[in-house]
Image (cartoon, rainbow, N blue to C red):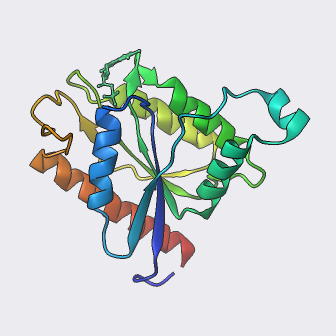
Amino acid sequence: MSSSAHFKILAMSGSLRKASLNTAALRTAVTLAPPNVEIEIADISDLPLYNEDLRINNGFPPNVERLIAKTIAADAVLFAVPEYNYSVSAPLKNAIDWISRGPTKPMAGKPYAMIGVAGGLLGTSRAQLQMRQMMISLDAMPINNPQVYIGSPKDKFDANLNFIDPAGLDLIKQLLEKTVALGRQLKA
Ligand SMILES: Cc1cc2nc3c(=O)[nH]c(=O)nc-3n(C[C@H](O)[C@H](O)[C@H](O)COP(=O)(O)O)c2cc1C
């Protein structure tokens, strides 16, 4: 894959609320995409709870099928990982469980990156560590560094929920660059 080829990142936020800071940080990440890199935020809010019977009886539900197809088509995946009770939020876990059952191991060999925003100091570090463990099962390729833990977010977002913390913005830019570099290397 040449260094100028179009590169597609599929993004997912594990928080479904409208004013989610994790989704807001993802929207900011979209604006930081390097040239020729497209970041699409997938909607995971309407996926049914994982149930093997749904797939066996009727095939994947259409919205699950679409998410799996988008994951397969993406060159990399970017997760915004909220921390719920020291762990990955249910909506994100659910999306990953569906994706993991896709017909061709949709995340196998695919780079993935994470950012996370939490009210406390630790910025979802516990949940992100659990994501890493989970993604081993999907055979995905982590971007190990930089680790983007956005804690104490009070002054890091403006009134329109733009993420404005200079150090955090720099980390997200680095993260995106590393994701694209690994993705291109793997495809070369
Ligand atoms: C069910 C639930 C559990 C939470 N557990 C944690 C936690 O374990 N650690 C933490 O730092 N924040 C925790 N929080 C606070 C969230 O980090 C905070 O609400 C954050 O803003 C959620 O992300 P969002 O703004 O993207 O919705 C929890 C919030 C909820 C709703």
Check the image and report above or below for 83 versus 117.
Answer: above
Q: Quadrant of the C terminus?
A: bottom right
Residue 157: give x, y in percent of width and height: 16, 38
Q: Where is residue 11 in the image (x, y as percent from the top left)?
A: 45, 50
Quick check: 172 left or right of 63?
Answer: left
Residue 55: which quarter of the image?
top right
Name which residue lies at 44% across and 66% down: 182
The quarter of the rendering in which ligand 1 is drawn is top left
Residue 48 placement, left or right of 185: right
Question: What count of labels does the image hold?
Answer: 0
Q: Check the image and name the residue furthest to the top.
A: 85
Closest to the observer: 120 or 20? Answer: 20
At horizontal 22% and vertical 21% (from top left) the residue drawn is 120
Q: Is 16 located above or below residue 186 in the figure?
A: above
Query: In percent of the image, x 18 and y 55: which residue is there?
Result: 170
* Extreme-right residue of the structure: 57
Residue 107 seen by the camera: yes
* Vertical relation: 188 (above or below) 97: below
**Front-most of residues 61 and 132:** 61
Q: Residue at x 28, y 27 (%)?
A: 118
Task: Say if residue 116 shows up in the picture.
Answer: no
Relative vertical location of residue 52 with respect to residue 171 in this rendering, above or below: above
Residue 113: give x, y in percent of width and height: 42, 50
Front residue of 141 and 3? 3
